[in-house]
Amino acid sequence: AGSIVKDSQHRFTEQESDWGFNQFLTHGALFQDDAGFIRAGLIELRAIITLVDDAALEITGLAQYDSRKETGFVGLKNQGATCYMNSLLQTLYFVGQFRRAVYHMKLPEEPKQGAAPEKPDVSYALQKVFYELQYSSTVAKTKKLTESFGWDSSDSFTQHDVQELNRILCDNIEEKMKRDMKAGSAEPNVVSELFEGKLVNFLECVNVDYKSTRTESFYDLSLNVKGCPNIIASFEKYTEVEMLDGENKYRADGFEELQDAKKGVRFASLPPVLHLHLKRFEFDFMRDVMVKVNDRFEFSKEIDLSKFVESSDGTDIYVLHSVLVHVGDVYGGHYYAYIRPTADGQWYKFDDETVQKATDVQAIDENFGIGGEQPPDTNGEDDSLRTSPTLRPRFIQGRKSFNAYMLQYVRKGHISRLLGPVQDADIPKELHDKILREKEEEEQRKKERAEQHLYIHVCIATIEDIRKHDGMDLVNWNEITPLKLRRSMTLGELKELLIRDRMVNTNDHNLVALWKCVNRQNNTVRPAGLVANGDVNRSLSDVVTESFGFREKVLRRDDVIKIFVEQLDNPAEIDNRILLFFKHYQPFKAPHLQTVATLHVPNTEKIGHLLEKMRNYLKAYDDEEIAMFEEVSAKCITPLDPSKRFVDVDMGDGGDIITFQKVLSPIQIEECLSALAPEEIAALPFGGEPIENAKDYYSYLLSRVIIFFRRKDGRGEAVRVECMATDSYATARKRLARALCLQTDPAKIRFFPKDYYQEAPRNVPLNLDDRKEDLNAILSIGNCGGANNNIRTLWYEENEHTVEEFESADEVRIIWSPHGGCLLAKPDSSTTFQDRDPLLSEVISILVPYNSTYACAVEKIAERYRIPSPSRVRLLEIRNAGIAREILPTEHVRRNVGFDDDHEIRAEPIPDDQTPEALGDEHQLIPVSHVSKEKQWLRGSLGHLYFGTPFLFRVRVAGEKVSTLRERLRQKMNVSEEEFKTWRFATLYRTKVEYVEDDDQLWTPVKQSLVGNDYASIGLEHKSNAQAKRSAVVHSKPLMIRTDAK
């Protein structure tokens, strides 16, 4: 039998009473046949708890440990696995100049009265975190900050890389500062001022006069750990000059012969605040796994980097300010930080909620590392724990691999400006007032929660509320705002309140009847007698249990009691009588069901006696036939026999609803329809179908569902169609076809339900078994409903074939791309590449006989689009926004290929200059892909994200200058010169990306075939605004701040 053992240590306190593993064992590993975790269908879980005395802990007496009192600082609350964020925030907080700049960022506009609450603003949420760190006496919270990032609870329990978060957060703050400056703010862009440095990539020929340089900015530096004993050696390796000689000589512009050259990096300038990321994680190609490098890597309190900076004035001396430490392996662990707030004084350890004093040895020497590589540990101690402050026993400390992962140095000559204390006067008054006002509001909400037991919520429905209601039951109680009343209030006082607030039109409380409305077993809410039998001296607290059926007098916060208030003409009219409600159904002009009267009648009276009362009330239907129904529940509408008594049909207790209507003949129905205007006919249910009787209208109300049908290809607006949950697949298609005014056969429409993992259609249409179900069952696939369960979404596709034809052939799902993957635009177009609409492509389905080859599909494509010959059409397999290979016509058709977001088949005409004859021996085709500037932390490594539409590009086999390639690519895609300057050129391999920064370099393609699976391609790195596609199997959530620019 298999077993897995993991251990952790934690000190349980009143504040930290919960602790556990956020990832114990993967789902896949649990169900592996050879793992042996499951025996006879059971899994055995065993927990062994060892209690450790306080005396064995690093610090005693921490049950009441107060970080603010002991150190002057407070920690940050860990939301699950946000220790990496907490460590970074503390580091940025103690850069005083940065904190002052954040405080002075523009505040968000106050929401309008009654408007829905907006997502918190990132800059304001960061301002509040810094404010709490500066003034709070207890731990500061980051919940509002992560909400402003657009994160949910799963993001808070997903650990990411601290360097990645640093880049993303600073980019977001910098963009906001730039927008504030454009809006008239005088504040400078402090992010670039503090963190931006410049480096120069250079290439110099040794024997001829040729030099090429390119300057770029950086906000942090990634330094090698492996093979470097200390930080100076790592800088030397970073700036090491590479010789291009032998077979690696360089072809310089203007010289026919290849030249020996020197290539390297020099620093033009270093920033005031220097972030150094230590490369502790590397990919081991021998073991095909990411490993953590724990090699000893020394760094000092002060470093002189002048020799690495061009034209240094000798001031490039830096003092160590903070050390971010990582504990664990490549798949998770824990982060904490050592920080010197004044850069020359006491060190402090910031470990989530806890702040402790530390020594130089603890902050520096103990975090050099201990040597060796650490592969992922799947059977031993787990490091991917939820990481709140953990106080470890002395004899356990040191078992985990902990070492410095990120260092922050500050320029020595600017310490007083960079780290100077932030005073009260540095905080804008409007920010200070806004935060204090919100604190007061929060305190008021806490007070209300604490006093909740003194109050009760009461929903009061009046006859006006009931008459306005058009639908089942008496009223929609969710639309009635509850009154918050003291439990000690008597029913007499409640009546006086209703009179004072004009909820009844009388000043005599004897004419006010309070009816208790209770939940019946059939899920309806109906009056069931007077509250407390009309005793006005009883309090609300008294009647909670005896009148409303609650088991306890102390209600939960969401419990509400419901009361119908009736104004009487005479108090005696309710004696020994039952209360009945009467609804009138009218099918024209639009179906309408309205409560028109309440009556008090003896329960022994015959139902038929009410007919005259209804005729008198409406002053109509004198000689017309009237049908009556009892609305027992939404699913039970029962015709009433006029000869029966109320007590005979189980209506003797009152509170029931009787629906009546005029019985219409077919001739009368035709006359009513002919009298309607076209727009009035269109307003009828289902776009023009009258509902003649009340019973059918109740069924309509019960089963009605609004479906927003969206095109599968995403084009156009959604179409709102009214359907019934009981509709068949065929009926739903007919309703959609009518709404779209389609001339096509409804049988040629296919439906696609919601994908299980994203708000998008599933790529495979409904199968034969699904189509046999009613619409309610179809909508349950993928949970197509939104917040309103009566409003759903389905996707549709119009085809040339009927659904039945798809069942008797193989479907080849093709994206026809006449432009070959390039989004075309006019040369003078002012739109950016990302703004273009790729509507020249279309998704088509080609039906071929079973066991056919792709040649059959190619022939049909050529015929469909009038291509002269099938040989001028090619099929490409697209995977994850990259060209995986060319599909040969001789290959057999594979089922369901092309139905996956990450796996598509693209068909395109072969341009004249890309035919085999035109290519010859001097040219070849190479794929070009779009690469996002943002990266994704996936399976322990930071990988590039591909996006957009890749395409094939003709290049010279002998090579071309990069500048020539870039210009030909720009012209092919019609991208403006200004925009294209920001795009980076790279060579993409299966496992890596190599940037080509020298425009004068000769770029030579790798000789390859597009039929294989492993080849090099061209990458164009630029900003992606495209919606990322989400795979059905989510391995890791990308780290991002999901916020709209304002």
Image: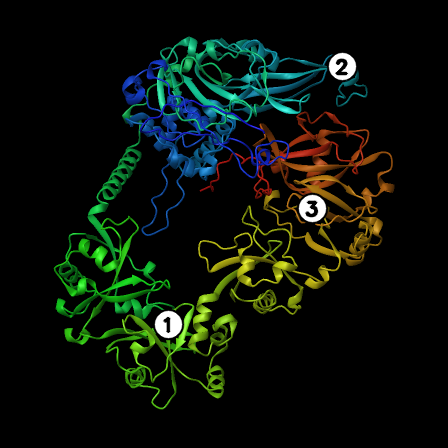
Residue 272 in sight here: no
- Classed neighbour count for the residue bearing mark 2: other residues with Cα under 10 Å, few (<14), some (14–19), many (≥20): some
Q: Mark 1 points at which residue?
A: 631
The amino acid type of the residue labelled 1 equals Glu
Residue at mark 3 to residue at mark 2: CA–CA distance: 43 Å
Q: Nearer the viewer, residue 650 or 257?
A: 650
Which residue shows up at 37% across the image and 26% down it? 99
Q: Mark 2 points at which residue?
A: 245
Camera-side mark, 1 or 2: 1
Camera-side mark, 3 or 2: 3
Residue 904: image tag: 3
Which residue shows up at 79% across the image and 38% down it? 1011
The amino acid type of the residue labelled 3 equals Glu
As drawn, is 186 to the left or to the right of 737?
Answer: left
Looking at the rendered image, the quarter that the C terminus falls into is top left
Looking at the rendered image, the quarter that the N terminus falls into is top right
Sequence-wise first label, 1 or 2:
2
Residue 951 in sight here: yes
As drawn, is 653 to the left or to the right of 879?
Answer: left
Sequence-wise first label, 3 or 1:
1
Sequence-wise first label, 3 or 2:
2
Looking at the picture, does residue 210 appear above or below residue 533?
above
Residue 1022: image tag: none
